Image (spheres, rainbow, N blue to C red):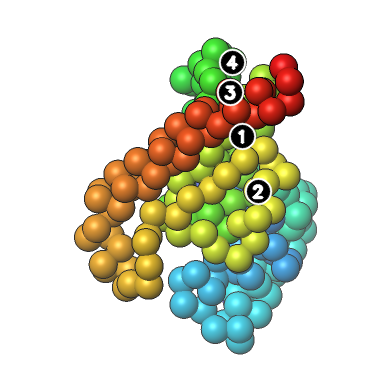
Amino acid sequence: MAALARIDIAGLDARLQDCHIEVACDVDNPLTGPTGASAVFGPQKGATPAMVRQLDANLQHYADVLQRDLGVRLHALPGGGAAGGLGAGLVAFVGAQLRPGVEVVARALGLEALIAHADLVITGEGRIDSQSARGKAPVGVARLAQRHGTPVIAIAGSLGSGAEQLHVQGIAAMFAVVPGACTLEQALADAAGNVRMTARNVAAALQVGAALLPRSAADSGE
């Protein structure tokens, strides 16, 4: 990538000009910068700080060449950093439109109509952390629920740094299914049982809350 000199799309299949391509992205991270593909996802894949700087410089160069040769500026495009920069590439080469993945799926399922008639929504994700606020499914579901005043509970494999940010995004409570310190292998092996246990605890907490309502009403004189 660092050695990329120019981009020539003369051989691109002309039929692509007649195609409408919509891409479902599960994150809104841009291609480059402190919240870009390299900085956010590089460490998750084992990249050291030095590697991350080099990777981001490579993507910066790639974006500069795209702007020069194709006339499209994609450095800060939301979703451009999805799938390691694939989002930006699809926009540049086939004119794709990037859409939040949760919106695409929700529209296909008619999810908002279902939420509108629900008393409670339970959603989930493998890991909930600060990155979850950048277009991940739980926040997308919570935003739909907020339109109808429906409370949302999230169950996740684990809760990471920044998970508390999701409270202001409409998620009332979050629960991690891993009961204690363990290896990833142990967590995966016990996942089904841990999810069931957590779901039972959530249900029990809801039952306690329901039982307290009459007492609260009586105490207030209602």
Q: If the image is split into quadrants, where does the N terminus sit?
A: bottom right
Q: Secondary structure at mark 3?
A: helix
Residue type marked 2: Leu
What is the x, y in percent for residue 20?
Answer: 57, 26
Which residue shows up at 30% across the image and 52% down it? 194
Give yes or no for contact between labels 2 and 1 (Cβ–Cβ under 8 Å).
yes
Q: Which residue is mark 3?
A: 214
Compared with 57, 217 (above or below) is above
Number of marks drawn: 4
Q: Which mark is residue 65?
A: none
Compared with 120, 45 (above or below) is below
Q: Which comes before the other along the chain, label 3 or label 2? A: 2
What is the x, y in percent for residue 2?
Answer: 61, 76
Disc nearest the viewer among 1 and 3? 3
From the viewer's side, name the closer residue of 203 and 74: 203
Q: Which mark is residue 116?
A: 4
Disc nearest the viewer among 3 and 2? 3
In screen coordinates, is 73 left or right of 6?
right
Label 1: few (<14), some (14–19) or many (≥20) C-alpha neighbours in 10 Å? many
Give yes or no for contact between labels 1 and 3 (Cβ–Cβ under 8 Å).
no
Q: Which comes before the other along the chain, label 2 or label 1? A: 1
Label 2: few (<14), some (14–19) or many (≥20) C-alpha neighbours in 10 Å? many
